[in-house]
Image: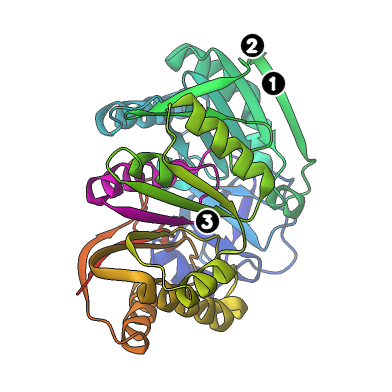
Amino acid sequence: MEKRITITKKGWRWWRSGHPWLYRDDLLPGQSAAPGDIVAVQDEQGRFLGQALYSATSRIALRFLTGSPDPVDRVFWGARLSRAVAYRRRVVQDTDAFRLVYAEADGFPGLIVDSYNGNLVMQVHHPGMARLLPDLVDLLHQQVQPASITLRNDSEVRRLEGLPLEVEVISGHLPEPLIVREGPVQFLVDVRQGQKTGLFLDQRENRRDASVWAQGDVLDCFSYQGGFALHAARLARRVVAVEASAFSLAVAQENARLNGVDKVEWVQANCFDFLKEAQAAGQTFDMIILDPPAFAKSRGDRPAGQKGYLDLNRRALHLLKPGGILITCSCSYNLAAEAFLEVLRQAARESRRQVRLVECRGAARDHPVLLALPESSYLKCFFGMAL
């Protein structure tokens, strides 16, 4: 059997919680393995607990794969990929851009695979997955027949695992431009330089369903490449889309031309400044969308992050007409859903508005949440109506 790693009593108690990660201080001192090794994990009495991927440098030392002693081989990974593919065929509708493999939630620790009109983009965040890459690529070819495969391995997370940064097309031909469809809206995708793997796929269903509420004048803050704005423009009279990045705004304008949309006013500005100036000018909107970057990327950031979300939502509520819709999001894992709701309650109080909560949403269904891994539940998206 493969190398054995013994965990402490504290580690055993954490393992009993079902969480698939064990940390460096959960291991008995003096133990190690090669980066990316599959190791057998045991308690201090020598009882087998499962098999896990080992990391030599990350604070997360072990990522569990299975509680079985059976071989973790090509057949094992092929079966897991088959389940992931079957699940997406059940839940993904009316789009050709979706997440195919979502790390631990699909049993592939440290691996992301997104599909853009049959072109796959892979992010490999663990040395164990890096070792398996040839087999994984072969299995993807067998099961989904991709037009191309691109490695988007430029995340800083790789540095924590001692992995190099790289972006490379490793299979097939990547079309340029690459265009995908999200319901009735089309988007240009830059899988080499765009955020994440090219698009924020986790917001796909929220963008679609937000458009149902669109009417009159709509404000889309942190518009990025125009996702919410272009969906809303189908029913709204006018959309104002605000984005600080000139590059992202240029892509958004290209997306508008691609869809024949001319009712969006594109504004390059800091969203906090825009909201402040809009309030001073007496502007109001029938719908406001807030989809900012994470304000609380660590626990230490939480107080400042809460303050940022509070300020943002309070300013937005001052601009919302009675009966108007606020769609507000947080992708900060370190700010739990209830804590974010409390921020919204405070924003409503301070803006002297009553807000009716209409929907509590998360990431799209191709981003399933593993109950034992709270870290896989990070996106909050609330639909509210100002009274």
Three-letter code, disc 1: Val
| Mark 1 closeness class: few <14, some 14–19, many ≥20 residues within 10 Å | some
Three-letter code, disc 3: Phe
In the rendered image, which quarter contains the N terminus?
Answer: top right
Residue at 29% across / 27% down in the picture? 94
Q: Badge 3 is on which residue?
A: 222
Magenta span: 198-227
Could you give the CA–CA distance between mark 3 and mark 1, rounded to whole angstroms? 30 Å
Give the image location of residue 354, x and y in percent: 22, 80
Give the image location of residue 54, x and y in percent: 64, 50
Specify the label residue 173 is tagged with: 2
Q: Is residue 202 magenta?
A: yes
- Seen from the viewer's position, the closer of residues 64 and 116 is 116
Report whether residue 68 is seen: no
Residue at 37% across / 48% down in the picture? 238
| Mark 2 closeness class: few <14, some 14–19, many ≥20 residues within 10 Å | few
Q: Measured along the vertical axis of the image, is residue 379 above or below residue 299?
A: above
Give the image location of residue 252, x and y in percent: 55, 39
**Tag 1, which secondary structure?**
strand
Q: Are marks 3 and 1 in contact (CB under 8 Å)?
A: no
Residue at 41% across / 78% down in the picture? 314
**Tag 3, which secondary structure?**
loop
Q: Is residue 208 magenta?
A: yes
Q: Are marks 1 and 2 in contact (CB under 8 Å)?
A: yes
Of labels 3 and 1, the one closer to you: 3
